């Protein structure tokens, strides 16, 4: 990339390429195959690059161990009262705001190796890092905000600050955090594209791509991305 000018308005979001999702407690099938393609994508001349990190405290609401329940069971969770109160929300509506929460193995715990970006991935110090899921009682698949919109990250502000118009996403997992982040990017008004060669999903079938398309997200492969960059 030496000497190559960056392309104004382009931004790359590398989603949750962390040890636990690649080789650790919640390894996504095929994730180890992503290092080559994602490094190639990282080397393209994006004007701005950011990496999100799932970054949970021990005992997080999304962990099966926290509830003493079987892995992958779904429970209903509610927004924490203190957060709703802090944000000026109406506590009486909490019971109406229950959401299904899949219970995962402990993963991406703050301060553990599993939470680190996978070694060999070229996420260098030119990247901004966006931690998410840092509140004990709130799951956060999207790198923009939690599903109740109580906690926002800096991501949208940072993209605007760097004058990003076109957002490209790669990473893990396609059917959870990539999907949620891509849909929020499109909702926030960015031209949004998921690059399939840089994505793997927890479950097979590809239903997430239909959901992203329906939300206005473009689905492209590495060949198409290189034509644009
Ligand atoms: C994710 C499950 C739990 C993801 C995060 O990064 O897609 N999936 N936490
Ligand atoms: Zn998580």
Image (tube, grey):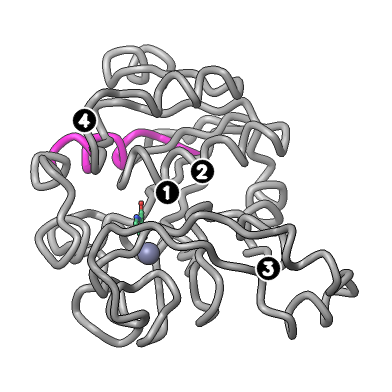
* Residue 37 counted in the magenta span: yes
Label of residue 151 in the image: 3
Name the residue beneath numbered marker 4.
204
* Badge 1 vs badge 2, beta-carbon distance below 8 Å: yes
Pick the front one: 125 or 193: 193
At mark 2, the secondary structure is helix
Could you tell me which residue is drawn at 24 percent across and 84 percent down?
112
Q: Along the line of sight, which residue is nearer the eye, 221 or 5? A: 221
**Which residues are the magenta region?**
36-47
| Residue toward you, 2 or 118 | 118
Residue 75: name its quadrant: bottom left
Q: Are marks 3 and 2 in contact (CB under 8 Å)?
A: no
Q: Residue at x 49, y 24 (%)?
A: 211
- The residue indicated by pointer 1 is 177
Which numbered disc, 3 or 2, marks the residue that appears first in the sequence?
3
Ligand 1 appears in which quadrant? bottom left
Between circles 3 and 4, the one closer to the viewer is 4
Residue 185 image-quadrant placement: top right
Q: Earlier in the sequence, mark 1 or mark 4?
A: 1
Q: Up-down: is 37 above or below 107?
A: above
Please give left or right for residue 149 compared with residue 49 in the image: right
* Mark 2 within 8 Å of ligand 1, using the beta carbon: yes
Asked if residue 33 lies in the magenta stretch, the reply is no
Q: Tell me how far mark 3 sits from mark 4, CA to CA.
A: 30 Å
Residue 100 in picture, x, y percent from top left: 50, 54
């Amino acid at each position: 990339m030496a000497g190559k000018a960056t392309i104004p308005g382009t931004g790359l979001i590398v989603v949750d390429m962390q040890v636990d999702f690649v080789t650790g407690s919640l390894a996504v099938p095929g994730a180890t195959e992503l290092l080559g393609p994602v490094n190639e994508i990282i080397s393209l001349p994006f004007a701005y690059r950011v990496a999100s990190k799932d970054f949970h405290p021990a005992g997080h609401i999304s962990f099966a161990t926290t509830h003493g329940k079987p892995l992958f069971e779904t429970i209903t969770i509610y927004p924490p009262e203190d957060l709703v109160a802090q944000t000026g929300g109406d506590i009486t509506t909490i019971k109406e705001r229950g959401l299904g929460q899949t219970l995962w193995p402990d993963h991406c715990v703050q301060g553990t190796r599993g939470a680190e970006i996978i070694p060999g991935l070229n996420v260098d110090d030119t990247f901004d890092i966006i931690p998410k899921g840092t509140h004990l009682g709130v799951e956060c698949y999207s790198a923009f905000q939690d599903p109740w919109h109580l906690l926002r990250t800096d991501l949208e502000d940072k993209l605007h600050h760097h004058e990003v118009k076109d957002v490209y996403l790669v990473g893990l997992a396609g059917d959870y955090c990539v999907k949620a982040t891509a849909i929020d990017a499109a909702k926030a008004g960015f031209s949004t594209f998921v690059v399939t060669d840089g994505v793997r999903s927890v479950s097979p079938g590809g239903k997430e791509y239909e959901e992203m398309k329906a939300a206005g997200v473009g689905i492209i492969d590495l060949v198409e991305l290189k034509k644009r960059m």
